Structures are given as structure tokens and as C-alpha cells.
Image: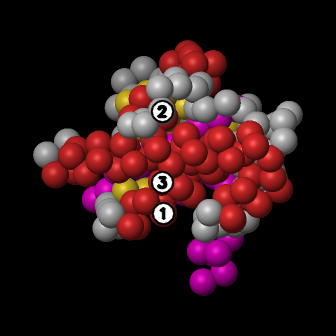
């Protein structure tokens, strides 16, 4: 019991993905604003869609600046106002095995996507994409980093992430139903 609780909060080590499911890794630079928000939103939407047991969601940063730190308090507050709990999450860096453990690594912007493409090990099986590639209502390509801004930036991140995650839930359902995951 104590070991499982430690694993839940020890985010510097990747969590094991379920053997019969598919993993999705949300990626931003520091793993304290955008990617933990996207992790919580996708988990919630997967739960609502009945896919929580089939899709495993995690988040990480391309840079390990904030390893083991909780999400930014402004991200926690904004997410909390919409019913998402980011408080148990802890930042970790992307690891080489993430490319083998997850079906999708979803970047928040082109810089993080380019980093993933450069660091991807030979023969990895993960799809690398922008989170907003599945957005249905927004035309932006990037989830802007709200770190140096105010409250409105965190609300904007949630608007974009909620939209994109709806598209990803549909994409993942389609992949699972087709046996591609």
C-alpha cells in the first residue's frame, strides 16, 4: 500500500502502463503548467467516456527544471475551478523509455514537438503530435505557456486543452475499437 502511494507521487520515475491499454504522455517544457493540466483534463474526459481503464495518461517536461515540484499554484487553482485536481501531480522529465511505453506523446507547441523528435530513440513506436491537432473548436496550433502571465492565460490553456482532449478521446476510442492501440 505504501509503495503504491509512493509510486503515485514519485513522478521522476515513469509509472507502469497497463499491459492491455494505451499510454498517452502530455509534454511541455517544465511539466508544471500545460502538461499537468492536459493530463488531468484527458483523464477526466476518458473517465466520462468509459475509457479510463483502457487509456493511461501521464505528463512530463522536456526540461527537468522542476522535477518533483507540484504544478504551478495558478494552474492548480484554474483547474480546480473547473473540477480538475492537479495537486497530487509532480513534475518529471521525459525519459527515453517514454517513447516505447506510450502510444502518443503529445506536445503543447512546436518547440517541444521538435525536442521530442530529436530525442526519440531509434525504433520507438510512439506517435508524436501536437495536442491541438485534435482540437475541434479552436484553430490554434499551440497551447501558449501561461507561466509569465496572469490568470487569464491559465483559463485560456484550459479552454484549448478541453477542446483538444475531446478530439483525442474520439481518436483513442477509434484506435482502441480498431485494435490499433
Q: Measured along the vertical axis of the image, is residue 33 above or below residue 9?
A: above
Spatial separation of the CA atoms under disc 2 and disc 1: 20 Å
Q: Nearer the viewer, mark 2 or mark 1?
A: 2
Q: Which residue is mark 1?
A: 44
Question: What is the number of the mark on residue 160?
Answer: none
Q: Measured along the vertical axis of the image, is residue 16 above or below residue 25?
A: below
**Apparent side of residue 117 relative to residue 6 in the rendered image (left or right):** left
Front residue (pair 69, 151): 151
Q: Earlier in the sequence, mark 3 or mark 2?
A: 3
| Res 54 visible | yes
Spatial separation of the CA atoms under disc 3 and disc 1: 5 Å
Front residue (pair 34, 175): 34
Region of the chain picked out in magenta, as a range: 1-29
Q: Earlier in the sequence, mark 2 or mark 1?
A: 1
The residue lying at 51 percent from left, 19 percent from top is 117
The residue lying at 74 percent from left, 39 percent from top is 153
Q: Position of residue 7 (x, y in %)?
A: 63, 66
| Res 89 visible | no
The residue lying at 86 percent from left, 34 percent from top is 148
Q: Measured along the vertical axis of the image, is residue 84 above or below residue 115?
A: below
Q: Measured along the vertical axis of the image, is residue 107 above or below residue 165?
A: above
Question: What is the number of the mark on residue 42?
Answer: 3
**Apparent side of residue 173 relative to residue 113 in the rendered image (left or right):** left
Local crowd at mark 3 within 10 Å, few (<14), some, or many (≥20)?
A: many
Q: Which residue is mark 2?
A: 138
Amino acid at each position: 500500500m505504501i509503495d503504491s502511494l509512493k509510486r503515485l507521487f514519485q513522478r521522476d520515475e515513469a509509472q507502469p502502463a497497463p499491459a492491455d491499454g494505451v499510454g498517452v504522455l502530455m509534454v511541455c517544457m517544465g511539466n508544471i503548467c500545460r502538461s499537468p493540466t492536459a493530463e488531468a483534463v484527458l483523464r477526466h474526459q476518458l473517465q466520462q467516456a468509459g475509457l479510463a481503464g483502457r487509456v493511461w495518461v501521464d505528463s512530463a517536461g522536456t526540461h527537468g527544471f522542476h522535477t518533483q515540484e507540484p504544478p504551478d499554484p495558478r494552474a492548480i487553482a484554474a483547474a480546480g475551478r473547473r473540477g480538475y485536481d492537479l495537486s497530487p501531480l509532480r513534475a518529471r522529465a521525459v525519459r527515453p523509455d517514454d517513447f516505447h511505453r506510450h502510444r502518443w506523446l503529445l506536445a503543447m507547441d512546436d518547440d517541444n514537438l521538435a525536442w521530442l523528435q530529436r530525442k526519440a530513440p531509434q525504433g520507438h513506436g510512439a506517435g508524436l503530435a501536437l495536442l491541438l491537432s485534435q482540437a475541434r473548436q479552436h484553430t490554434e496550433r499551440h497551447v501558449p505557456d501561461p507561466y509569465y502571465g496572469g490568470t487569464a492565460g491559465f483559463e485560456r490553456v484550459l479552454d484549448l486543452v478541453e477542446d483538444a482532449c475531446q478530439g483525442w478521446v474520439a481518436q483513442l476510442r477509434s484506435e482502441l475499437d480498431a485494435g490499433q492501440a
